[in-house]
Image (cartoon, rainbow, N blue to C red):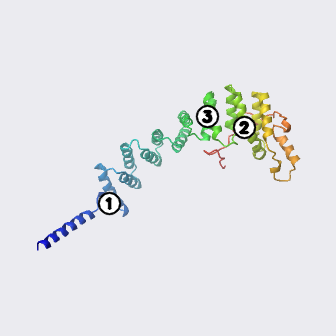
Amino acid sequence: MFRHIALITVLTAVALAAGVAMVPGEREQWTMLVRDGRNQDAVKALEARYRAGKREVDAVLHLYKLYMSFAEIDRATRVMQGFVADRPNDPAAVSLLARHYGDIQDKRAEVRTLERLFELAPSPPTARDLLAHYRIEGAFDREERLMRTLLANQTITANDAERLGLILAAHGDLYGARDALTRFDEIANPERSIGRLVLFDVLVQIGDKTAALNKAASWIGYWRKVSIHRTAAGTEIPSARLIRMMMAADELAARALICEVQRNETPTSAANVGTHSASEDARERADDDPAQEACEVKVPEAEADAVGNTVSHIEPRDEFGRRRRR
């Protein structure tokens, strides 16, 4: 009899414990409500937890999403601001707040939060977003400061390095322009000429003609080959302009460098496709190219419509330096 009573008692206790364990907790309750689409009840349960100080990441984010689904923008903003206040040094939390401000079109708050995010965790995507906002707002001083920071960190893109170099050159900061355009020269596509022409001019102005001529010699061979096939009618060939700049800087050194480039070039007539003969192709190259065969260097004359600011011929490009489709 005693054993029977003990067994019944133990089984009852186990059943009670199992029943208690099967009762859903607070977390299971609101997750079940969200799963079942009972969003109003889920909001009430999550608000109760939030007021009680139980602010787990997933619970807070679900509460934020529910507020946004109900167009409760102010409440959603307060929740996200509180979420970041609890985690002030968490880049992921600050990024969520910046995205929220972008979703609700609060541009000033978005820029402020992106600046805070960049301080916590500098990254190219954050910098790209900030630069876009600065340019739209006309905040060019802040744009320049940010591009200087990117240049110092070696995370600047080719387009931004070129833009920074042109800005600094226009402001008379020749050494800053040299650093920016040198970085541009290192990472940009070899066919891009505007920034490199300005870099040549900047190097000459600061008295480093040797570096300017050596860089020009490394560019000119590729530019001449590209100009044969890609230069549009009525536009000045970049290699022609570069040769004039080289001659103006130091004619003797420029002639020697151009001759060296000519000697190192491989014949291109065999690669040409069409009905042109080798002699016809050579004549066309002699007409188009400023540097002649047999190392006979002639300085090309500037075309009337090509004289002026090189910025007027800048083509639209993406952040990787590729031409944008019109």
**How many discs appear?**
3
Horizontally, residue 8 falls left or right of residue 305, namely left
- Element carrying mark 2: helix
- Element carrying mark 1: helix
Amino acid type of the residue tagged 1 in the rendering: Glu
Q: Residue furthest front?
A: 3
Q: Residue furthest left?
A: 1
Q: Is residue 29 above or below residue 188?
A: below
Q: Quadrant of residue 38?
A: bottom left
- Element carrying mark 3: helix
Amino acid type of the residue tagged 2 in the rendering: Ser
**Disc on res. 180:** 3
Q: Where in the figure is residue 227, as x and y percent of width and height?
A: 76, 43
**Disc on res. 105:** none
Residue carrying label 2? 218
Q: Nearer the viewer, residue 135 or 27?
A: 27
| Residue in view at x 62 percent, y 28 percent | 175
Q: Where in the figure is residue 80, as x and y percent of width and height?
A: 39, 47
**Disc on res. 28:** 1
Residue 231 in view (yes/no): no
| Mark with earlier residue (1, 2) | 1
Q: CA distance from mark 3 to mark 1?
A: 56 Å
| Mark with earlier residue (3, 1) | 1
Horizontally, residue 176 falls left or right of residue 102, namely right
Q: Where in the figure is residue 271, as x and y percent of width and height?
A: 80, 50
| Residue in view at x 82 percent, y 50 percent | 270
Q: CA distance from mark 1 to mark 2?
A: 67 Å
Amino acid type of the residue tagged 3 in the rendering: Ala
- Pair 3/2: label in front: 2
Q: Where in the figure is residue 286, as x and y percent of width and height?
A: 85, 41
Q: Is residue 47 above or below residue 168?
A: below
